[in-house]
Image (spheres, helix red, strand yellow):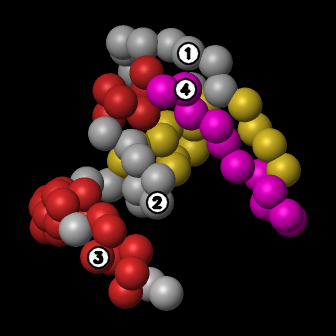
Amino acid sequence: MPVSILTSRKGRARRIGNSVGLTLPKAIREQFGIVDKTDLTISATPDGILIQPQHDAKFAEAMDAFERVSARYKNALKELAK
């Protein structure tokens, strides 16, 4: 099944310990909602590699709530972390 290309950007493969990590451009991350620790599905296709984010609505909702709380109580959380 042919894949239509909506956006094309250059990334880079880099060694991370005994593995290789992929650097994704900001425009691609924003377009697909990929943030730090986003789980990805990586598939080999006849045309190349297909990388898709795995979105978990409950997790995303929990992260949004955490970000709001951590921003509001930033100083208190900093004191508690001591």
Q: Is residue 10 visible?
A: yes
The residue stretch that appears in magenta: 16-26
- Residue carrying label 3: 76
Circle 1 Cα neighbour tier, 10 Å, few/some/many (<14 / 14–19 / ≥20) = few
Q: CA distance from mark 1 to mark 3?
A: 41 Å
Q: CA distance from mark 1 to mark 2?
A: 21 Å
Query: Could you say where residue 17 lies in the image, as x and y percent from the top left?
Result: 85, 64
Q: CA distance from mark 4 to mark 1?
A: 7 Å
Considering only order in the chain, which callout, 1 or 4, is on the residue closer to the N terminus? Answer: 1
Question: In the rendered structure, which amino acid carries the disc numbered 1?
Answer: Arg
Question: In the rendered structure, which amino acid carries the disc numbered 2?
Answer: Lys
Q: Kindly indicate the quadrant of the structure image that contains residue 75.
A: bottom left
Decide if residue 34 is on the left or right side of residue 60.
Answer: right
Query: Could you say where residue 35 lies in the image, as x and y percent from the top left?
Result: 41, 47
- For mark 1, give the secondary structure: loop
Residue drawn where x is 18% and y is 61% of the image: 72
Circle 2 Cα neighbour tier, 10 Å, few/some/many (<14 / 14–19 / ≥20) = few
Q: Are marks 4 and 3 in contact (CB under 8 Å)?
A: no
